[in-house]
Amino acid sequence: APSDPDLVARATAAKAKLGSKVFVLGHHYQRDEVIQFADVTGDSFKLAREAAARPDAEYIVFCGVHFMAESADILTTDSQRVILPDLAAGCSMADMAVLGQVEAAWDTLTELGIAAETVPVTYMNSSADIKGFVGRNGGVVCTSSNAKRALDWAFEQGSKVLFLPDQHLGRNTAVLEMGLSLDDCVLYDPHKPGGGLTPEQLRDAKMILWRGHCSVHGRFTLDSVNDVRARVPGVNVLVHPECRHEVVTAADYVGSTEYIIKAVEAAPAGSAWALGTELNLVRRLALAHPDKQIMFLDKAVCYCSTMNRIDLPHLVWALEELVAGRVVNQITVDADTAHHARVALDQMLALPG
Ligand code: 13P
Ligand code: SF4
């Protein structure tokens, strides 16, 4: 639906009044009505770098989800304030790894004498607490655009990786990009004692995958791929690495949201693409490339419901409050957590390549 013209005018006016004091970041999965006000759009890796590169902006309004705003707070200076227009914009995957559970898992590895050789790696889609844990224990953060580089680095530091919280990104990267086998990976279930694994399984594994997943990308199935191939001859299937292993294996291409955008831009006119990622992004790509046939991989509509929490009324509210001198919905990470999380984030930003 087109944006409410009154709200558009109010957001435009508030941004103009705030000028260079405010910088608006927009993740690719945000609604059109929000993305039109983003000073920069990107995937989570690009937005983390952009937040770190704007020391002059007093306010960073983060149109994305909670863990991204936390990372922005960690990477910005003490005087900068990060604002999430709706505090209910969380991420179900990030919520699947809670600090107490991860500490219990680490205790298990310590009792088995294998913690010292294990490097914790966490996907960006995790709370600041988890990033802090990883930083304290010599690990690194990764995103879907640098997971292989992060794992290459981790396997130079130790012989095992504990990968949090997305089992699919961990498995897909290990098996499809690093030459590990499915048997090298075990699935650690935080709701079961010892993760539901025997000491032998934990000792033998190279990749200990946390049992977390994305509720959006996890919905695509092998049937989605087979159906679209039957309906659209010659279609290119391009999926995000948060999709299940059998979906990624059956696809033609796999990559982060930035990769998906670049692949569609570079595709020849007339080509057909089924995209296994969030629907706001797929719709925008389809509109921007009318000469190509861009479609959603599944027949069922599927937005990320928490990304969609950030809508134009919330953005207008956050901006107008700033104009009135009030900071609402500020996201702050305590100094100790931020310090250790920053170590793991800086390690990611320093990865070669
Ligand atoms: P990227 O932005 O790293 O591609 O991650 C996708 C995602 O699910 C963000 O929440
Ligand atoms: Fe979390 Fe998935 Fe939504 Fe990204 S798309 S914010 S991983 S639930």
Image (spheres, grey):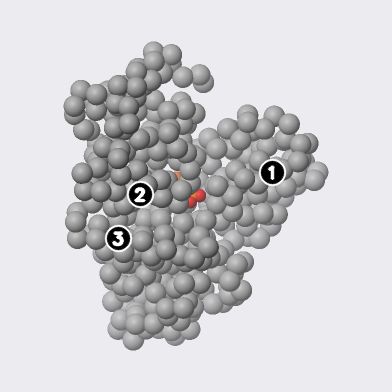
Between label 3 and label 1, give the one nearer the viewer. 1
Above or below — where is 256 with respect to 298? below
Residue type, label 2: Ala
Residue topped by disc 1? 266
Q: Separation of disc 2 and disc 1 at Cα? A: 29 Å
Based on the displayed image, in which of its 4 quarters is residue 279 positioned?
A: top right
- Give SS at disc 1: helix
Q: 257 or 237, which is in the foreground? A: 257
Question: Few, some or many C-alpha atoms within 10 Å of disc 3 (few <14, some 14-19, many ≥20)?
Answer: many
Above or below — where is 309 with respect to 174? above
Q: Residue 104's spot in the image, x, y percent?
A: 28, 71
Q: Separation of disc 3 and disc 1 at Cα? A: 36 Å
Question: Few, some or many C-alpha atoms within 10 Å of disc 2 (few <14, some 14-19, many ≥20)?
Answer: some
Q: 157 or 189, which is in the foreground? A: 157
Based on the displayed image, in which of its 4 quarters is residue 307 positioned?
A: top left
Q: Residue 118's spot in the image, x, y percent?
A: 39, 78
Q: Residue at x 30, y 59 (%)?
A: 342
Question: Which label's residue is closer to the chain start, 2 or 1?
Answer: 2
Q: What number is the disc on residue 52?
A: 2
Q: In screen coordinates, is 166 left or right of 69?
A: right
